[in-house]
Every structure is written in structure tokens, then in C-alpha cells.
Image: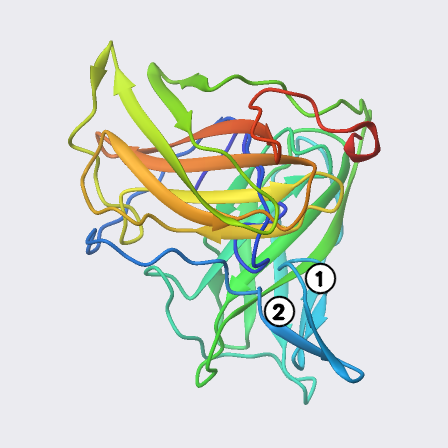
Amino acid sequence: MNTPLRITAFAAGLAAAFGLALGVGHATGSGDPSPKPAMAGHAGHTEESGGGAEHLPGGLQISERGYTLSVDNAFVTAGSPTDLRFRILGSDGKPVTAYQQEHEKDLHLIVAPRDLSTFQHLHPTLAADGTWSARTAVPAAGEYRVLADFTPAGAAEGLTLGADLHAAGDLRPAPLPETGRTVTVDGYTVTLGGDLTPGRSGRLTLSVSKDGRPVTDLQPYLGAYGHLVALRAGDLAYLHVHPDTGAPGPEIGFTTTAPSTGGYRLFLDFKHQDTVRTAAFTVTTDGAAGAPAPADHQH
């Protein structure tokens, strides 16, 4: 779906986590853009551990609830197109071949580097034998996280699994990109309102304008007028939330919860004039946009 500059150590399954980076993508989609309840991701479920329950963010585990993410080619070369192939294995070790659609797709795949400098939201193709494949290329050398967001057929709820992807090449680590409350992408201006507060639900609004005029004719993409993916710096915990408003712009509202203090990258996908674009923000849970993440979260 998206190509350059984009992120999210998760967009769905954390019961809270955020992060954002800037990028542009191309894709088409349609659906019912009516208001939908905010979602804390498919992976933010309760895990039974010993005698108590533990809430884990999505994308932090390669295996959960009997399902395992198995990546065929975990070693790639930066800048070279490759067919990223993987399978979701059930508790019997066999590939899962049937899924429930979520937001018009059977599975959503996020690819992001550890420094959250780029972001890709892909929709792989499923073969009859249960193998998923997506044509992609990572832009730079380094360690990446692959996050699969899906709901197996017959399951009561979805989940997000994560695995590492290693890209060979000239590695040049960098801290989180600094942004303010406003970013631009392909001539569009996107302004962020609201703050993230650890452990407490809050509302974020993102307003889209072009050439100084509010955009009021956003197109539905994957069943909504906007999709927000948030990744937490340091471990790429994934949170995928959806709009709590149904108007086609200029403002798109989201309700979510940050799981902890620290730096996050927020990636907003929006569609206008038949093209999907991604606007990315760096935020901290103290509510300040543009501030670098704490030193122990930088890579």
C-alpha cells in the first residue's frame, strides 16, 4: 500500500502504543466510511501468565494463543526488491488458510525499521497452501520488524504477531525524526491535535488541508476516512486505531491509550484524489510533539 517513509511498531494489538513517520503510498480502496468505534488493535488481548492476567502490546511476540508467524526469508538486501513470504501456523504446526476480513482485508502487514524512520503498510497475497507473499523493498540497512495483523476464521478476536527482518547493507543509525504539530506530504498539510497520556484514554485529531484550504472530500480507504498506526520507540509495540468520526474531512478523530511514557511514531494513512498518502509524526507521552525520544529509546 505505502512505499517510502512510513512506520508503526504496531498499529493494532497493544492496547496502547504510538509512533509515526512520514511517507507516501499508492493504493485503492472503498468501503463504508461511517463512524466506527476506536480500536486498540487486535493484539491487545489479555494473556494468562501463571496466576494473573497480563496485558501485552501487539507485535511483541512471534507466537501467541497457539498461532506463530513464520517468515521464510528473514535476511534481505537493502534497496533490492524482494518477495517477502511468510505463513501463519496454527497450534498443529500447519499453515492457516482461512481468515476473517478486517477493514476489507484478510491480513494487514506492517514493515518498519527499529529507528522508525520509514513505514510500509502492505496487503499480501494468500496462496492456497497458506503462504502469504508481498513484493517490497526496504530502503536502508538495519533491523526491521514485520507485524502481521489478522483474525483467523472462527476466532473470537484478532491478534498481531511480530518477527525480525534483517537487511544487509551500509547501516547508518539515526534518532527518531523530529516533527512539529504540522507535517507536509505531497503538498498536503496535516496538523495534529491532542496529546498522548500513559494509561489514560485520549483523543487525537488530524486535520488535512491542501493549498491553504481544508480537504472535505477525503475518500474511504479500507472502509474508513483515515487509518492511524502507532509504534512505540524502543520495542516497536504496535497499535492500530480507527476514526471515531465519519465525516470526509478535514478533521479525522481517533481515541487511544498510550501504554507507557516514551517516544512514539504516528502514521496517518489518508486517501484523496485516488491516492493514499501517509503523514508521520514523532510524539512523546508528555504531550509534546517533535521532541526526540529519551536516549534509551533511540537507535
User: Which of the 4 quarters of the picture holds residue 24?
Assistant: top left
| Quadrant (top left, top right, bottom left, bottom right) of the N terminus | top left
Give the residue at mark 1.
Answer: 72
Label 2 to label 1, Cα distance in Å? 8 Å
Q: Is residue 294 above or below residue 196?
A: above
Secondary structure, mark 1, is loop
* Residue visible at 34% across and 59% down in the picture: 103
Dot 2 or dot 1: first in sequence order is 1
Q: Is 45 displayed left or right of 53 in the figure?
A: left
Q: In which quadrant will I find the C terminus?
A: top right
Residue at the spot 46% in from the left edge and 82% down from the top edge: 156
Residue 122 in view = no
- Examine the rendered structure and indicate whether residue 154 appears above or below residue 107: below
Tell me which amino acid carries mark 2: Arg
Q: Nearer the viewer, residue 84 or 241?
A: 241
- The residue at the far top in this view is 211
Dot 2: what SS? strand
Indicate the position of residue 160 as horizontal and vertical percent values: 58, 63
Which residue is at the front of the view, 242 or 23? 242
The type of colouring in the image is rainbow
Residue at mark 2: 87
Q: What residue appears at the point 33 percent right and 48 percent down from the top-left corner? A: 243
